[in-house]
Amino acid sequence: MASHLGALTLLVADYDAAIHFFTQALGFTLLEDSALDEPGKPGKRWVRVAPSGQPGCALLLARAANDEQRAQIGKQGGGRVFLFLETRDFWGDYERMRAAGVHFCEQPREEDYGTVVVFEDISGNRWDLLARRADSRD
């Protein structure tokens, strides 16, 4: 079976603020931003972003639609690192993201598998910015 993960849904409070964060602070590409005209759901959109120039999985930015969903914004990983942004230019990306105001939860560190630092997205979800060592790739 030839299949792949196409997208992961990430709950956000506001489409435009999330698009700005992902495209400006993280350097992602806006793949799609389409209005979805659904009865009872004004302003619903289909918004996908992904790291620039990289094929593979995208993030579907979904504005929380009710109180239960709003309560989960920023908590989708239960307080743990939830998403992993791999890079080949750790220090360049780290400095660019810092200059853009991304909140880092710690100082970069070296691990057996590579260089890593935890950061939070616009909603408070925790991510790893990670540069794997060449010998630790699967």
Image (cartoon, rainbow, N blue to C red):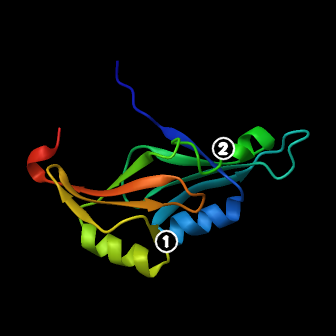
How much space separates mark 1 and mark 2, taking CA atoms?
22 Å
Q: Residues within 10 Å of mark 1 (few under 14, many from 20)?
A: some
For the N terminus, the quadrant is top left
For this rendering, which residue is in front, 76 or 92? 76
Residue 25: numbered disc = 1
Q: Answer with mark 1 or mark 2, whichever residue precedes in sequence.
A: 1
x and y percentages locating residue 31 in the rendered image: 54, 55
Q: Quadrant of residue 33?
A: bottom right
Q: Could you say whether the residue bearing mark 2 is in a helix, strand or loop? A: helix
Mark 2, residue position? 72
Q: Amino acid at mark 1?
A: Ala
Residue 105, given in percent of the width and then of the height, sits at: 42, 64
Secondary element under disc 1, as helix, strand or loop, is helix
Residue at the (39%, 44%) spot, across then down: 56
User: Which residue of the protein is positioned furthest toward the top in this rendering?
Assistant: 1
Work out which residue is located at the far bottom of the displayed protein and give it.
99
Q: Is residue 84 left or right of residue 101?
A: left
- State the residue at coordinates (52%, 60%): 121
